[in-house]
Image: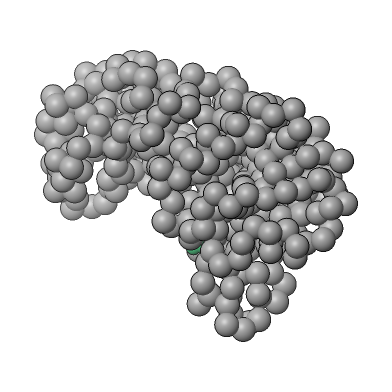
Amino acid sequence: LPHVVILATGGTIAGTGATSTTTIGYTAAKLGVDKMIESVPELKQVADVRGEQVAQIASESMTNEVWLKLAKRVNQLLAQKDVDGIVITHGTDTIEETAYFLNLVVKSKKPVVVVGSMRPATAISADGPINLYNAVTLAGSKEAIGKGVLVSLNDQINAAREVTKSNTSTADTFRTPDLGFLGYMQDNKPHFYRMSTRKNTADTEFDVSKLDKLPRVDVVYGYANMDRVAMDADIAAGAKGIVQAGVGDGSIAAQMMPAFRDARKQGVVMVRSSRVGSGIVARNGEANDDKEDLVVSDTLNAQKARILLMLALTKTNDTKDIQRMFYTY
Ligand SMILES: NC(=O)C[C@H](N)C(=O)O
């Protein structure tokens, strides 16, 4: 049997509610990793599993510090001969962010699968146990090697770079808009049909082994009648980069342009992303990125663009080089 380590961070998969019909007003991050493993005895049929508790939080409270701790532990474990794959149990609110962060900093081709659930462990038809079973099966599989960090819930396998939470509360919330998920978990095995084409894990240039913090990068949301107050406040608070989740194709409001120019004068790296949820933000499309010295996020949503920009800023401030990274990862 493959050796799979489960790193637990909390979330609804470890959540408990007052009654079996409580699916909303429950408390996330209550069960410890050993209790979660015990509650799915079938795990022992597919892998030699053991657990470690890395954090015990609802994922809305995820921080850069927990990411660094988690990534370092994943890298230590995957360097061991007796570890074949890792499962990370996680809340679903920021699962796509943690998965993409790991997709950029894990230095191994061995499978890393991030899993969560939409119903707490105490609910009727809780989705946590089957999701955990599928995740451990996937992490122990040969098929998952070299596919980058994966997110698996609801019998589906998604790529970390592309997956996003699309519904606040239903079990089928995870989607890869337009591009589609990678495959299914069915009948105790993965069935892959496609792969993400972007570089990941062992093929990236990022190394967090000596980092204990990441540069501050904030997201500013675009909307009609927006002004520069939030962006200026973020920069005053020390942001080295700003991602605008702009309207449409990452458009910049006329009244925001002076704020973008002031930010660039101070060396703040400005990334145009979109609030739309799918599609490419085209370079020199809705803004003159060459002239204004801006970066476009390509198809990354704003929360993932923030992660890539933080990591990029650990290497360089050069906007051309950072743009290359956005087209590479
Ligand atoms: N379904 C969930 O896991 C939601 C929860 N708020 C979390 O992200 O921890």
Is 306 on the left or on the right of 259, as rendered?
right
The residue under the point 63% across, 49% down is 52
Is 190 on the left or on the right of 306, as rendered?
right
* Residue 214 visible here: yes
Q: Nearer the viewer, residue 81 or 120?
A: 81
Q: Residue 22: x percent and y percent?
A: 58, 80
Q: Nearer the viewer, residue 42 or 82?
A: 82
**Above or below: residue 128 compared with residue 313:** below
Q: Nearer the viewer, residue 12 or 191?
A: 12
* Residue 249 visible here: no
Q: Quadrant of the N terminus?
A: top right
Is 29 on the left or on the right of 247, as rendered?
right
The residue under the point 43% across, 26% down is 210
Model colouring: one colour
Q: Residue 82: x percent and y percent?
A: 76, 32
Image quadrant of residue 245?
top left
Q: Residue 132: x percent and y percent?
A: 71, 55
Q: Residue 58: x percent and y percent?
A: 48, 60
Image quadrant of residue 319?
top left
**Above or below: residue 323 compared with residue 58:** above
The residue under the point 22% across, 18% down is 291
The residue under the point 59% across, 25% down is 107
Give the total number of marks visible in the rendering: 0
**Above or below: residue 267 compared with residue 45:** above
